[in-house]
Image (cartoon, helix red, strand yellow):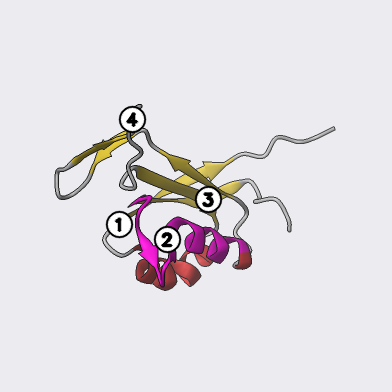
Amino acid sequence: MDMLPSGNAVRVTLYLSDGAKFHHVPTYSTILDLLFHSGIAGATVLKGVAGFGAKHRMHSAGILEISDHLPIRIEFIDTAEKVEAILPELEKRIGSGLITMDEVRVINPVKS
């Protein structure tokens, strides 16, 4: 796997609940597997401690409770071509989540 080259790229951010499932498997896990097997340069899954979504219900991780509706954010950056190739499958898996995409400029410093 080559490093993402310097230049223009696309950053994709997916927002979902950690309780979301795709074919009885946690959605974030199936998306991470898809990204890995599609040759995406790298991805990060972040779990929030509190948040709310489109239904405007507040969810948080209290000391005495663990919510299965905490926010999950998945981010990855790759070429527009790779992103477009997997976008239909991402849309299928995200369910009621949200996908955002924005252009970014990647800078890979020269290693000595």
Mark 4 or 1 closer to N-term?
4
Marks 4 and 1, how far apart in space?
27 Å
Q: What is the span of residues highlighted in magenta in the rendered image? A: 16-36
Going from N to C along the chain, the mark reached first, 4 or 2, is: 2
Q: Position of residue 7 (x, y in %)?
A: 58, 47
| C-alpha distance separating marks 4 and 2 | 25 Å
Task: Locate residue 112, reporting x and y percent.
Answer: 85, 32
Question: What kind of residue is marked 3?
Answer: Ile
Q: Which mark is residue 97?
A: 1
CA gap between label 3 and label 4 equals: 37 Å
The count of marks equals 4
Q: Disc 3, disc 1: CB below 8 Å?
A: no
> Which of labels 4 and 1 is toward the front?
4
Q: Secondary structure at mark 3?
A: strand
Q: Which mark is residue 77?
A: 3
Q: Name the kind of residue labelled 4 in the image.
A: Leu
| Quadrant of res 109 | top right
Mark in the foreground, 3 or 1: 1
- Identify the residue shown where x is 30% and y is 57%: 97
Q: In whole angstroms, how far apart are the C-alphas of marks 1 and 2?
A: 10 Å
Q: Nearer the viewer, mark 3 or mark 4?
A: 4
* Residue bearing mark 2: 27
Residue at 51% across / 50% down in the picture?
76
- N-terminal of the two: label 3 or label 4? 4
Q: Are marks 4 and 2 in contact (CB under 8 Å)?
A: no
Locate residue 5 relative to residue 46 in the image: left or right.
right
Residue linked to disc 4: 64
Q: Is residue 35 magenta?
A: yes
Q: Nearer the viewer, residue 45 or 78?
A: 45
Name which of mark 3 and mark 1 comes first in the sequence.
3
